[in-house]
């Protein structure tokens, strides 16, 4: 049931693109009246945010599931609520320290002057969030924005209209439009939103759309944090505990039915072990999910177009000679009706297959033969830099080589995806997989201006460098050069 909120533009159903500029202006005017809120004010907002989100858990779980067609309750609890709760708790504990003015070293030649750094709120943060983790990826940047003392406008995905409407209603219970505003609607709203002159814009989504958003933001010189995606590889070393690797890769691949920006996209491993690995993956998937059709633990693909795209990737690979192994012997018509795709392992892959060229974003797992670490690394480094990389093995020398020589947004060793929820390390992409980072202190700094301040001493000898220049000036320059 859609509830109408008479206090929201257009009844809270959808936002008119032309209204967005007025909302931004109102937020900026409110910010200018209080441009650096104290910790008590920020703490109150973070606590209110936690109360609102966690207090409507059941409603969000249902709304997200309805938007997907079906989404496992546990998928939502693990990937949305546990992450959000951890993020808010971390911010409440550490933000007072991050807010403090900090001393910075002063070079010898400028002493006894002092340098300090003052973290300062930017103003209004724009957040464009995607459909795959619709609540988490709207709220996690919001936590950083609020902790840094900003106001925020959020544009959730049109693919999750129930969640978006609910988020609008829930946040309106604790925040005015001048503090936090949720814009709902389709592509025209998103396009207008990305063109607003925010003080910082966060976008999470595909690389192709990220380029469009980055270009729109660039016209207003708006700094951006782009969290995109790409083909995140798994490298399995000969030293790996294969049983452990199989379980963790299967879990990482099938969470949210593979609709995760950091999901394992393809596997690189010794050719002699590929068949046994593929069979073990299928067996593990069937242990996790004995059936897929009608299984409440298994999430559906978000939309018909996305389901059709996955089927096209499989058909293209099979036509080009790939071997296909599919978990669970469920009725294909029923699976199609429910938009469910079981784990499908694709072996004997070749570079010309679309499954090896596009980000998969579903439970399809191609495997590529690589008989040495150098060969695996060459495959990874010849492609676009991924958002995540996963390495399985016990050989520390090889592990360190991968960590030092590969370039990716982040890495999990002997695990998949869990680096993303570590609040003490930054989360972000590199190159085509994104730019900038947030989570924890990285988010606070992304949404702050770290203002450098030089405080001159009354005992400064800088006057000796004033014109007109004399021998005394030149002696002073010579002395300073010796100090450097």
Image (cartoon, rainbow, N blue to C red):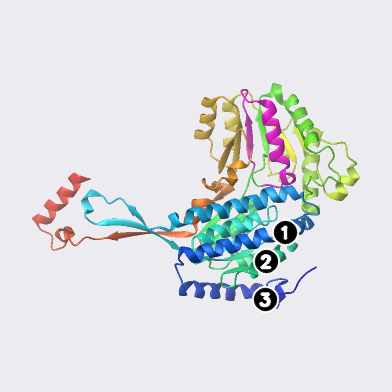
Q: Are marks 1 and 3 in contact (CB under 8 Å)?
A: no
What is the span of residues highlighted in magenta in the rendered image? 231-260
The quadrant in which residue 362 appears is top right
Using the numbered discs, state the Cα–Cα distance from disc 2 to disc 1 in whole angstroms: 10 Å
Residue 457 position, x and y percent, is: 21, 60
Q: Earlier in the sequence, mark 1 or mark 3?
A: 3
Q: Is residue 257 above or below residue 403?
A: below
Residue at 83% x, 42% y is 292
Q: Earlier in the sequence, mark 2 or mark 1?
A: 1
Viewer can see residue 386: no
Residue tagged 3: 9
Residue tagged 2: 170
Q: Is residue 36 above or below residue 141?
A: below
Task: Assess disc 2: are there few (<14), some (14-19) or many (≥20) residues with their C-alpha within 10 Å of its C-alpha.
Answer: some
Residue 46 position, x and y percent, is: 56, 61
Secondary structure beneath label 1: helix
Q: Are marks 2 and 1 in contact (CB under 8 Å)?
A: yes
Residue tagged 1: 60
Camera-nearest label, 2 or 3: 2
Secondary structure beneath label 2: helix
Task: Assess disc 3: are there few (<14), some (14-19) or many (≥20) residues with their C-alpha within 10 Å of its C-alpha.
Answer: some
């Amino acid at each position: 049931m859609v509830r109408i909120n008479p206090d929201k533009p257009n009844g809270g159903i959808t936002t008119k693109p032309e209204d967005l500029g007025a909302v931004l202006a109102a937020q900026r005017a409110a910010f200018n009246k209080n441009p650096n809120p104290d910790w008590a004010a920020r703490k109150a907002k973070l606590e209110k945010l936690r109360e609102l989100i966690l207090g409507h858990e059941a409603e969000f779980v249902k709304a997200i599931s309805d938007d997907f067609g079906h989404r496992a309750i546990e998928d939502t609890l693990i990937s949305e609520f546990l992450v959000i709760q951890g993020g808010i708790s971390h911010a409440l504990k550490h933000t007072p320290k991050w807010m403090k003015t900090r001393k910075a070293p002063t070079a010898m030649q400028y002493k006894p002057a002092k340098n300090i750094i003052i973290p300062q709120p930017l103003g209004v943060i724009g957040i464009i969030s995607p459909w795959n983790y619709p609540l988490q990826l709207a709220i996690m940047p919001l936590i950083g924005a609020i902790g840094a003392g900003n106001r925020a406008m959020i544009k959730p995905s049109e693919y999750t209209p129930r969640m978006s409407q609910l988020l609008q209603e829930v946040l309106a219970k604790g925040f005015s439009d001048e503090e936090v505003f949720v814009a709902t609607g389709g592509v025209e709203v998103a396009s207008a939103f990305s063109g607003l002159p925010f003080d910082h814009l966060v976008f999470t989504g595909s690389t192709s759309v990220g380029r469009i958003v980055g270009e729109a933001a660039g016209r207003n010189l708006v700094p951006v944090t782009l969290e995109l995606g790409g083909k995140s590889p798994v490298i399995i070393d000969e030293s790996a505990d294969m049983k452990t690797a199989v379980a963790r890769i299967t879990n990482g691949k099938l969470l949210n039915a593979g609709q995760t920006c950091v999901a394992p996209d393809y596997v690189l491993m010794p050719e002699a072990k590929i068949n046994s690995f593929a069979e073990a993956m299928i067996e593990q998937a069937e242990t996790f999910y004995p059936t897929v059709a009608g299984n409440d633990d298994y999430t559906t693909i978000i939309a018909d177009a996305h389901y059709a795209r996955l089927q096209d990737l499989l058909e293209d690979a099979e036509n080009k000679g790939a071997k296909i192994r599919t978990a669970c012997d469920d009725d294909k018509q029923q699976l199609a009706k429910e938009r469910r795709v079981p784990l499908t392992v694709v072996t004997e892959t070749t570079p010309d297959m679309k499954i090896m060229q596009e980000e998969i974003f579903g439970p399809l797992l191609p495997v590529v033969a690589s008989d040495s670490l150098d060969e695996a690394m060459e495959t990874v480094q010849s492609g676009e830099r991924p958002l995540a990389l996963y390495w399985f093995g016990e050989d520390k020398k090889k592990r360190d080589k991968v960590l030092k020589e590969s370039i990716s947004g982040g890495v999990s060793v002997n695990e998949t995806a869990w680096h993303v929820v570590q609040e003490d390390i930054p989360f972000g992409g590199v190159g085509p997989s994104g730019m900038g980072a947030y989570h924890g202190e990285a988010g606070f700094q992304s949404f702050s201006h770290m203002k450098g301040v030089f405080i001159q001493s009354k005992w400064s000898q800088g006057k000796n460098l004033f014109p007109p220049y004399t021998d005394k000036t030149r002696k002073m320059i010579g002395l300073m050069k010796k100090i450097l």
